[in-house]
Image: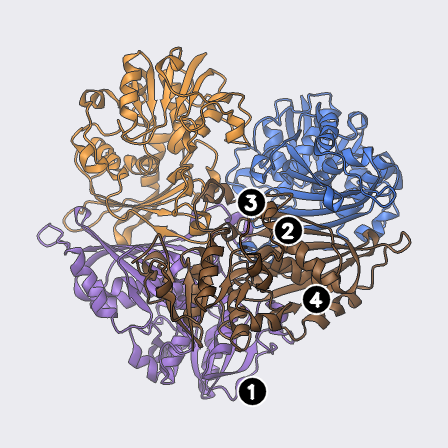
Chain colours: A orange, B brown, C blue, D purple
Amino acid sequence: VIAASILGATGFTGALLTEMLDRHPEVALEALTSSSYEGRRVTDVFPHSRVAAAYVAYAPDRVAGSDVVFVCYPHAEAHPVVAELLAAGHRVVDLSADFRLRDASLYPKWYQFDHPRADLLTEAVYGLPELYPEAIAQARLVANPGCYPTSMLLAALPLAREMKLELVVVDSKSGVSGAGRTPSDKTHFSAVHDNFRAYGEVGHRHTAEMLQELETAAGASVPVSFTPHLLPLDRGILSTLYCRPSASQGTFEIPPEDEVRALFVRDYSAEPFVEVVEHTPSLREVQRTNYCRLAVRTDPAAGLIKVVSVIDNLVKGASGQAVQNMNLMFGLPQASGLESVV
Amino acid sequence: VIAASILGATGFTGALLTEMLDRHPEVALEALTSSSYEGRRVTDVFPHSRVAAAYVAYAPDRVAGSDVVFVCYPHAEAHPVVAELLAAGHRVVDLSADFRLRDASLYPKWYQFDHPRADLLTEAVYGLPELYPEAIAQARLVANPGCYPTSMLLAALPLAREMKLELVVVDSKSGVSGAGRTPSDKTHFSAVHDNFRAYGEVGHRHTAEMLQELETAAGASVPVSFTPHLLPLDRGILSTLYCRPSASQGTFEIPPEDEVRALFVRDYSAEPFVEVVEHTPSLREVQRTNYCRLAVRTDPAAGLIKVVSVIDNLVKGASGQAVQNMNLMFGLPQASGLESVV
Amino acid sequence: VIAASILGATGFTGALLTEMLDRHPEVALEALTSSSYEGRRVTDVFPHSRVAAAYVAYAPDRVAGSDVVFVCYPHAEAHPVVAELLAAGHRVVDLSADFRLRDASLYPKWYQFDHPRADLLTEAVYGLPELYPEAIAQARLVANPGCYPTSMLLAALPLAREMKLELVVVDSKSGVSGAGRTPSDKTHFSAVHDNFRAYGEVGHRHTAEMLQELETAAGASVPVSFTPHLLPLDRGILSTLYCRPSASQGTFEIPPEDEVRALFVRDYSAEPFVEVVEHTPSLREVQRTNYCRLAVRTDPAAGLIKVVSVIDNLVKGASGQAVQNMNLMFGLPQASGLESVV
Amino acid sequence: VIAASILGATGFTGALLTEMLDRHPEVALEALTSSSYEGRRVTDVFPHSRVAAAYVAYAPDRVAGSDVVFVCYPHAEAHPVVAELLAAGHRVVDLSADFRLRDASLYPKWYQFDHPRADLLTEAVYGLPELYPEAIAQARLVANPGCYPTSMLLAALPLAREMKLELVVVDSKSGVSGAGRTPSDKTHFSAVHDNFRAYGEVGHRHTAEMLQELETAAGASVPVSFTPHLLPLDRGILSTLYCRPSASQGTFEIPPEDEVRALFVRDYSAEPFVEVVEHTPSLREVQRTNYCRLAVRTDPAAGLIKVVSVIDNLVKGASGQAVQNMNLMFGLPQASGLESVV
């Protein structure tokens, strides 16, 4: 049995992780920490929960017995405690962005802070299980990917590995839970219901992860234009990718759709949580699951390969992927504790 | 032309009132006040608006030229400024609850504050145009009714006038805009979407208005049990009323449905904004209008008369009714400025 | 292992039952029948499903090996096949209304058909597990209750057993899935979204079950006034009950809230799927579960006891309850296969 | 006063057009035709309506006195009646796709029928008022544009006129009303609510209009890749366009954002219904209005100009634009009858 703790357990991702680990057959929860809800029971804060536990304030000794600690702190607040946990000998899955970028010099640009631990950035493994399974298995520190990058990278990597891409347009549509649990004008029901909008049209922080991993896979930088939109629903991300292979002598050669789909099938046939489908998937198919579904279409007249990708932003895009990473780290089947819907 | 100002113009009711008065053919807006948004233009705060004006901080001289001032302050904060405005010679429509109850002793019980101006409570007219049209026309101070009481009283008054009622159950379902514009856990999209709940199951403040006006109409107190619920939509209130006439010698005599409906038709045939319909109305039919629609059903086996009432909580339940009151106060047709949807 | 078949497996209840039985640790699915989708795979019709099976046309020999057959046919179409299945020696859980009323003479009134099998009506057990657990365990034929009656009876029975009730008002609000999968003007997205309405204001068929079981429990008929409403969401029923104990010498004696709640706790403390809570529950808490949550409030001024009841209409209100009944029929723990959300 | 009739007045666009023309100060409605609802009053079919009229079956003499006839028939069913109406001397606004493409040979490919009236295709004017105002003013036959092309063309034309574009990606998200009023599995509330999907990923019919008008404006064909998606809301289209100017010597020269925006301001400064805004618009801002709002962003790193475009699909995307065309045809101000929300 793996002893696990969750730091920042009352945000959307922490709360869902609590449910998932509580049911996980190989996990025992040690501590659930919260500064706002210290002393209160999980069921008081989340009436739908059936987890019999109470929140405690974080202190190193509260998690002393934990084999793994999940950190669900906001960006820029996670890295000090992660460093502390590693020093104390814990393995860590960090759900913030603080260790997702390998190059420390990118943090001031994308996240507006100077990262003090370039050494840990080098050590951290980007926690996309379909990309780095062996490294994750050995890692002390796993940087759990962002929700948008998860949906985008699973859709783009099979192409980036196989052909030179001169452009990847990523048009993503996310449910509101991605904005977190803190109330604001932007998450007020009356602002979202029956409405739809784009936001962060250029320069969204998640672009950095997409660029990093796409470049790593392709061996060269790939231009990415990423635009997130806010859906009037709670959970799920659908990303529509428009990928343009580089022209050869001025002509775009788009392979037949079957050949393109075969690339995806080849890359994902052994993956338990990525499914290449022939129909166009909807969010409903993956909500409350850890699955990513991908559909491929070609548009030769426009010189494009389109990929539609759907995930649950809180599961495969956050807490479910964190559990999947933990499973890899401790030698469990990847799907352990992830079979039933959440 | 009537010069009008709105105090607290950036809440949901103030903002909608701004739109309605801006289009009103007989009104010129003098001042729109806001403490939070002083100096900002209406269109900066509400991108969908087309009102060319900016918010100012409230001060008595800002509204010096106003024939009428609409006060959209929270409960307990409105009465001092209302008193000040009246003293300065303005006529006032107050959208708070501060002058709805005629008996000052009820304020500590229902609103947890001592009301300092029993004299103004006596003078204020309860602004339900279908109930007190003449008094409203003469009033210096109109207390605009609550949204729930509006939906309930229009449904119950024709019965209360005609027969002794031993019980009125009011099961109301409201859109989220009734909770106001301030973000909170309760109005977060993720808490409301795809969800439904009751709240304030016993003792909701609006009960006080219902009891007061029903007793006035009936000449005797009528027991009211009021339960509000929160719908996953933005605008509208549907109230289902279950009215039990007093038994005569142990038997409930429920008149035929046609006779009951005739009571409603009689009371409302001359009213421009109350429609007695034969089908069961849905919220859609009254959203963005100042109409109330009522349907009557009898359930003799249970000894009940049911009335279904629908309004837009922000229009007939707040800002539209405020305009209707202003129209009465200044001798305009009741429907002036209220014809088109908002 | 219990061999089970589902007749009419492509409606909302049949499809959900398919998912639940497929995961049930003690069940093996024999046949899933459908006239419209014969020959198609489950995953073709329901892309979110992971059930590896195909639909067949119904014929007696298709289900010959089934210990239990679940019938998900429309009202008036179920009883002939149920009779046939019983004659062939199968045990049956019927999800239609065809065997819910014990008195054959009620069918022409409430369901507009003459029931040919008064004998089976006498034999059938009304499948509310909290009410008739022993009879269900022995039954050849279980009549699975309607969704509204389930939400209402669990809320009213503890009161009906304990005190004489002179009135029970049932104001129910249901998600759209209760209307079934067949497209119609009433279930078109544009008719339901951002809208709310009452329907069947007097005389809804489900009233018959409520009257029958309440009378059985109370030993005398109890007047019930039932009004269903349609919520702009997919799954869940919230029923608000207003129960009036009979007056003694003209005075309503409403017991203290704690005493009333104690009646509920007493009746349900051993039930795995009914929870008496102190807060007011929302639909979210029970969606995709087999739980019913109940909250009790007293309103002595109006002479009423209020009960708020929430269930998932497709789970505790249909397919989950059917599984719970099957568990009782075959000596399994009631919660077998019902622990995880669906 | 203009006498107007509407053929096929009970679909979503016909019903909205009925409301708009009923309120139009310069229009008198002659006939509203419907095959399904002949003889029924408008208010019986649409309870929210206040139009005092009844539907009649279409016959040429029913509309004999009409200066203009609006045809709201399905594609392929409109052209015979349009030809008949023109022959009888009426001016026609056709809301179907039957006269949008100037080249008859495109109809078999995009609409699967042979178009018998190449002469009328040549004569018909594509009814985008911002593009062909003079021709519309003179036209006997105006082909009202599709909803997606309206949202796309207003966003792309200012660029297409000014620079050579080598790619236009159009990622559109539409409310459900765009799918029409006929109930189907795809428009069932339970299929759409809390869900999101792409559809018609390659080869959607509306692409033909986009290609035709972009080529006309640019003087050369422009590759367009169009992907529609279905939003869980009723009204509105948001299109996100990714426009790539042709590279000069392998380098993409993206002008500064202000310069690009200036192109849009220049083209639309005199247009009453197109607004170039600096913030990112949401659907809320244009729902129930005839406005299109456009925002421009540049992404030089990816070599792209992004344009976000929002309209109400039933107003500017259909019925409102039809009224705007009628206004042009009869010499009225373009905004006549279009000022208030609908």
B71 above or below C339? below
Q: Is residue B138 left or right of residue C305?
A: left
Q: CA distance from mark 2 to mark 3?
A: 15 Å
B262 above or below C42? below
Report the disc number at residue B112.
Answer: 3
Along the line of sight, the residue nearer the viewer: B84 or A341:
B84
Check disc 4 and give the amino acid type: Glu
Q: Are marks 2 and 1 on the same chain?
A: no
Report the disc number at residue D61.
Answer: 1
Q: Which residue is mark 2?
A: B207
Q: Which residue is mark 4?
A: B278
Q: Is residue B120 left or right of residue C155?
A: left
* Crowd band around label 4 with a 10 angstrom C-alpha radius: few (<14), some (14–19), many (20+): few
Check disc 1 and give the amino acid type: Asp
Q: In this rendering, which labeled residue sits more in front, label 2 or label 1?
A: 2
Q: CA distance from mark 1 to mark 4?
A: 35 Å
